[in-house]
Amino acid sequence: MKSHQVVKACFEDQSPKQIAEEIGVSVSLLYKWSQPVGDNQSGAVNPLDRTVQLNSVAPDNDVLHWLCQQADGVFIRDPAGSAQAYRYMPATNEIVRQFAAMLSEITQAALDNKITDQEATAIRQLWDRLKAYTEGFVTACEEGNFAQIRGVPPPEPPPSGLDCR
């Protein structure tokens, strides 16, 4: 979805007049933000486009991290695309390993019934790493990126007449 479409989608829940009043801009400017920008287009660069521009010069996506915090969330970068091939069993084992490492960090941090800022930072880093890796795995699943194990024939069903309960 393009930024002007996101702005226009806001009109579904509230009138443009209400939105313009709430954010302190004119209705005409709000409408311009909801239109495409470019040759033969009447739109204006909107705050979403400006946010992308500002983030491009900010270190480590600080703008996006801050914005996500304002929405009670966190920013996690998607994996670098589907070029990374995941092998099913090693990938699932890695997810379990990373989850266990995070739980271990939480357990160690909570032994004294308090969690310091340094311990919270370490837990956050492990959690973010786990989420990013798992997102890559899920994306690979969605894209069917398990070609290297597709050549293995599925196990044969038991012969008919056998009760395998």
Image: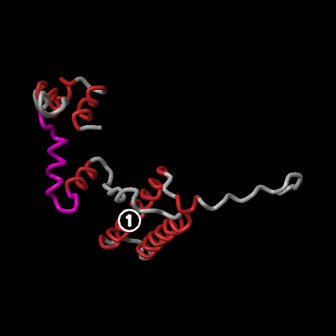
The answer to which image quadrant residue 37 occupies is top left
What amino acid is labelled 1 in the image? Answer: Arg
Residue 50 versus residue 84: which sits nearer the camera? 84
Secondary structure of the residue carrying numbered label 1: helix
Residue lying at 14% horizontally and 28% vertically, measured from the top left: 41
Image location of residue 113, percent across then percent down: 42, 72
Q: What is the magenta segment's predominant secondary structure?
A: helix
Image location of residue 39, percent across then percent down: 12, 32
Left or right, 140 with respect to 116, comes to right
The answer to which image quadrant residue 165 occupies is bottom right
Image location of residue 159, percent across then percent down: 84, 55
Left or right, 93 with respect to 66, comes to right
Does the stretch in magenta take in 97? no
Image location of residue 63, percent across then percent down: 20, 54
Residue 66 versus residue 162: which sits nearer the camera? 162
Residue 139 versus residue 58: which sits nearer the camera? 139
Does the stretch in magenta take in 55? yes
Left or right, 39 with respect to 65, comes to left
Q: Residues within 10 Å of mark 1 (few under 14, many from 20)?
A: some
Which residue ends up furthest to the front in the rendered image? Answer: 151
145 above or below 31? below
Which residue ends up furthest to the right in the rendered image? Answer: 161
Residue lying at 16% horizontally and 26% vertically, measured from the top left: 31
> Looking at the rendering, in which quadrant would you find the N terminus?
top left
Q: Which residues are magenta?
A: 44-62
Residue 39 versus residue 78: which sits nearer the camera? 39
Residue lying at 14% horizontally and 44% vertically, measured from the top left: 50
The residue beneath circle 1 is: 129
78 above or below 97? above
